[in-house]
Image (cartoon, grey):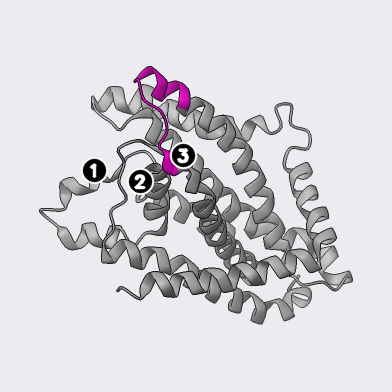
Amino acid sequence: MSSAPCEGGRILRSVSMSIIRTIVERRELVANLVSRELKSKYKGSVLGFLWSLLTPLFMAVIYVFFLRLLAGRGVPVENIIIGVFAWQFTALCVNGGMTCVTGSSNLVKKVYFPRFILPLANTLANLVNFLLSLAVQFVILFLLLGLKGTTVSPWSLALPVLILYHTLFNLGLALMMSSANVYFRDTQHLAGVLLSAWFFVSPVMYDLSFVERVAPASPLLANLYMLNPMAVIITGYRALTMPGEVFPWTPYTIAALVLPLVFLWIAGIVFQRSEKNFADML
């Protein structure tokens, strides 16, 4: 397992350079499509970008003021906020990725360009929203932690690396979902069900302490749980941001960190092989 981080690093550098080349070579088209995504997302909306903040905050409020009261226990509010904002980034990329090709059928049929740019533009548009929401998130975290006499961890300076990693994983999801939805329109309905299930098996509204409680009785199940990419991503955000939080380095978490990069590579191959029939299928 010692070679896994090195292999993951090589994949990350290779994929990142490929994406950067595409952005540089087609920067005007990418910029226009990202701008279109951002404008269409909030077209006719009174609150506009605020919905990107309000949706995860509402999720956190519902948990804190209802579920925690009913259960009489829960994780710190700061951890919940970090979890829901990170989850929202992935959920938006999945939902937007499903329709980024089918919703641009006229463009796909009439103009030649690398179709890869469509899910890329969708992911970058959601990244812009995520980065803006992070600014608000950090203000909230500073206030909440300040009331406890502490502040965010200095390791938060390393967040750009995790954000890049998270974005690449989301791009892989967008690539896979966009190509699948062209061939199988039931993908949109199936994705909603799978996202709901994925939400509950990811530490969005709870932390790893809940999983550790079942570890003595079912250690294999607890280890397999850590193969969930969103488990390590959300835990990573908390470990880099929250004081006293430590990332659980185990063979399973290391494998989980490599899996999304391998998934992005596979999704890129699947998308490349299927895009040749997009115009006919649309």
Q: Which residue is mark 2?
A: 203
Amino acid type for the residue under numbered disc 2: Pro
Amino acid type for the residue under numbered disc 3: Val
- The Cα–Cα distance between marks 3 and 2, rounded to whole angstroms, is 9 Å
Are the residues flagged by discs 3 and 2 in contact, CB closer than 8 Å? Answer: no
Q: Which residue is mark 3?
A: 84
Identity of the residue drawn at 73% across and 69% down: 22
* 95 vs 149, nearest the viewer: 149
Task: Estimate the x, y position of residue 146 in percent, counting from the top left.
Answer: 41, 21
Q: Quadrant of the C terminus?
A: bottom right
**If you read the primary sequence from the N terminus, does the residue marked by circle 2 or circle 1 appear first?**
2
Give the residues drawn in magenta, as a range: 142-155
Q: Specify the farthest residue to the front.
A: 154
Q: Secondary structure at mark 3?
A: helix
> Would residue 151 be seen by someone viewing this image from the given angle?
yes
Are the residues flagged by discs 2 and 1 in contact, CB closer than 8 Å? Answer: yes
